Image: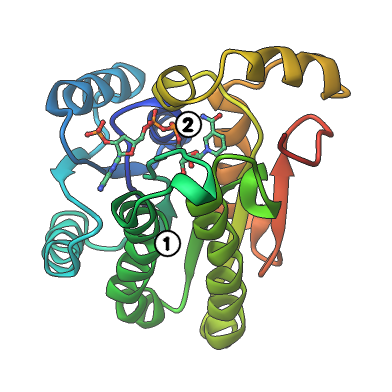
Amino acid sequence: MNVFVTGGSRGIGRAIVLKFAGEGWGCAFTYVKNKAAGEETVKLAKKINSQLPVKYYKLDIKNAAQVDQVVEKAINDFGEIRAVVNNAAVVRNNAVAMMSDKEWDEVIATNLTGPFYVIRSFLMHLISNKNGRIINISSLAQDGCSGQANYAASKAGLIGLTRTIGKEYGAKGITSNVVTVGYVPTDMTREHLSPTLHDFWMKHCPLKRISSSEDIANLVYFLCSDEGSFINGEVIRVSGGLTYAP
Ligand SMILES: NC(=O)c1ccc[n+]([C@@H]2O[C@H](COP(=O)([O-])OP(=O)(O)OC[C@H]3O[C@@H](n4cnc5c(N)ncnc54)[C@H](OP(=O)(O)O)[C@@H]3O)[C@@H](O)[C@H]2O)c1
């Protein structure tokens, strides 16, 4: 079986690729700028299983034509793709009163419109296989987060998109779910979030620990496995019991 992961070059996306590789799935994944990180993900996946097909593709998910081209190429390269994971995202933080059109548009285009393009492009393939899994990666910010109106709106939007896919295409054998992340130390959080986030997390997370990318990858894999076949239209947090963002 094969998985397609957007933003598999770094962070949580890389952990998702490596989890699927460890379970024996072929992995197609994308990067947008960081080719060296993409190569490193391939190297790490091959270390897990040198026989596995693992390929990476340059893709800006904001661009619908590029999405169609890359999806077509991945399907040609891999034959059947069973699971599609929309993981790539960006943050451009600002208070609402200060937020520029560019900050708003870029986040919505990448985090919400991009996943829509990817899903639309894969749907006929998944339907023809009568078996498909779609996972959209969201954030606790989906319920609102100070300084992240654009990001929160994009992640809340993913919930409506996900549940609609689950209703429209469930009868075709396709499940669609959201995995909601709390806080994971990655480039995204290191570069864009306040250093106090770590303290907030340790204070309020009932499990009193920071989650790893692997915590997220484990649930994504479960939902895509045969064991996850009756879970559809759900929004599942992997956040150690913390249910809100600051
Ligand atoms: N880290 C957290 O605490 C946290 C919390 C809540 C939710 N999440 C969610 O978890 C997911 C992964 O986050 P992360 O922390 O692993 O992020 P990250 O380390 O910043 O990695 C982002 C990935 O997305 C890719 N990407 C960025 N813009 C793109 C575009 N326009 N087209 C295609 N790919 C693009 C990047 O590719 P390049 O490497 O080429 O730049 C990279 O692979 C995101 O959906 C994020 O919103 C993360």
Please tell me which residue lies in front, 176 or 186: 186
Q: Amino acid at mark 1?
A: Leu
Instruction: Give neighbour class at mark 2: few <14, some 14-19, many 20+ (Cα, 10 Å).
Output: many
Q: Quadrant of ligand 1?
A: top left
Q: Quadrant of the C terminus?
A: top right
Horizontal arrangement in the rendering, residue 239 relative to residue 33 (left or right): right
Give, as a three-letter code, the residue at label 2.
Answer: Lys
Q: Residues within 10 Å of mark 1 (few under 14, many from 20)?
A: many
The x and y percentages for residue 135 are: 51, 56
Of residue 105 and residue 33, the one placed in the foreground of this image is: 105
CB at disc 1 and ligand 1 closer than 8 Å: no
Left or right: where does residue 185 sit relative to residue 208?
Answer: left
- Badge 2 marks a residue whose secondary structure is helix
- Residue at mark 2 to residue at mark 1: CA–CA distance: 25 Å
Residue placed at 14% from the left, 55% from the top? Answer: 77
Q: Which residue is mark 1?
A: 112
Where residue 17 appears, x then y in whole percent?
39, 35
* Ligand 1 within 8 Å of the CB at mark 2: no
Q: Position of residue 220 (x, y in %)?
A: 57, 45
Q: Residue at point 12% right, 60% down?
A: 73
Q: Which image quadrant is residue 203 in?
A: top right
> Please, what secondary structure does the residue beneath circle 1 have?
helix
Q: Residue at x 40, y 81 (%)?
A: 127
Name which residue lies at 44% across and 37% down.
Answer: 20
Image spot of residue 132 (x, y percent): 46, 68
Residue 19 - label = 2
Question: Outermost residue toward the right?
Answer: 206
Is 6 located above or below residue 120 in the figure?
above
